[in-house]
Image (cartoon, helix red, strand yellow):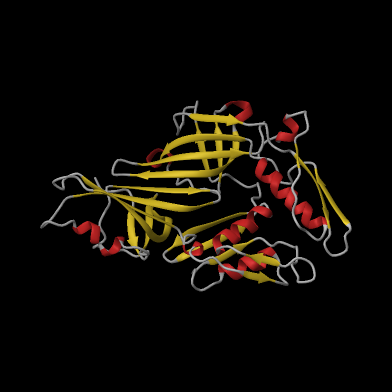
Amino acid sequence: MSLGAAILPDALPDPTMPVPGSVQVVEALHQPTTYRLRYQFNSADGDFPLLKERHLEPEKELAVMVMVNMVPKFLVFGPVVRQDIVIVNGGAGSALEVIGGDLCLAMDREDKTKVWNNVTDSLAVLAVFTDPGYRLVPDLDQTTTLHTEFTHSLVQRESDLRFVRRLARRNGFWFWITSEAPLLNIAHFKRFRPGGDPDVEFRLNMAEANVEQVSISWDSERPIAATLKQVSQSDKSVITAAVQRSPLTGLAGKALGDVVSKPRTAHIAVPVDDSGSLTARAEALLIDSGWFVSARVVARLSVLKKLVRAHTVARLQGAGSRHSGDYIVARVVHDIGPEDHFMTIDLIRNGWN
């Protein structure tokens, strides 16, 4: 049987590319998408040719593509960064694992020191995304706080990847990269907005079930409100902000603040210049802490007929009145072999019914 994925050097077909025995792709919130190509090899003329294969060298860019309902879908595109090798005495049964990831890895190669003035967070991120070395197409939501030399400059003392992730977290945004077509990589910097139809449905306990089981857990010990106070460094006035619940619309009828009765309040200390900036930081904290319900399902592509991706919405049916409904796909592990394409899917939710 043939592998259920194509490995494309530079995102283009190449018949000289060695075909692995299996492939794993992992995509998750707040993490680069990574891939692992697994090979078995033997010796030839006293050497191991696969270990010198030009397509598997450092920085060689590979794409992993799968076919879904006769339509090509790119799971990841990016450089090779590592190999793990096991050589068996006699050669037979030796193993090679080639590890790489998306273009986030290129953004993490150089620590930078830069002062950004007269920009918002989103304008700084746009400037990073449009660096020609990254070859990214930007997809951004706008932020409003302006950084100037008269208030607080925006200072970067890290790689572009860590800089963008820091700005995403403090605005309650997500940052991720998707490969939509050969050499078309879109960099997203956005806040999740519920609404619309789900991208996929998981069904159990019904005639048309497409998953075998679901594991669900919840954790109620998380902040549900934030009260903040800061002193302006420009005029020494007191800046205050209070956010009583996450601003994000719930995926279910009851958010954590509706479920618990005792206070759970967080305080964060950050240098800001106005209450609006302080409120934005508090909202970001409560958005992140609001995902108190999690679930896991394992699905087969041959049964589901849908490719599940991180940062999308999935609907769970047949899990009872409390836990059925819409979830965010937080992580997907794609295990692709000759038999099938298995997906281990982690879901999160900011409420229950």
204 w.r.t. 273: above or below: above
Residue depicted at x 65% and y 46% = 194
Residue 335: % across, % down: 37, 43
Residue depicted at x 64% and y 50% = 192
Taking depth in this image into account, of 285 and 342 the one nearest to the observer is 285
Residue depicted at x 56% and y 28% = 319
291 w.r.t. 260: above or below: below
Which image quarter holds the N terminus? top left
Residue 230: % across, % down: 82, 53
Taking depth in this image into account, of 150 and 41 the one nearest to the observer is 150
318 w.r.t. 75: above or below: above
Residue 151: % across, % down: 79, 67
Taking depth in this image into account, of 61 and 340 the one nearest to the observer is 61
325 vs 227, left or right, is left
Residue 318: % across, % down: 54, 28
48 vs 37, left or right, is left
Instruction: Report which quarter residue 211 is drawn in.
Output: top left
Which image quarter holds the C terminus? top right
Return the residue found at the far bottom.
132
Q: How many marks?
A: 0
Res. 70 in view: no
Residue depicted at x 31% and y 44% = 337
Instruction: Report which quarter residue 251 is drawn in.
Output: top right
Res. 16 in view: yes
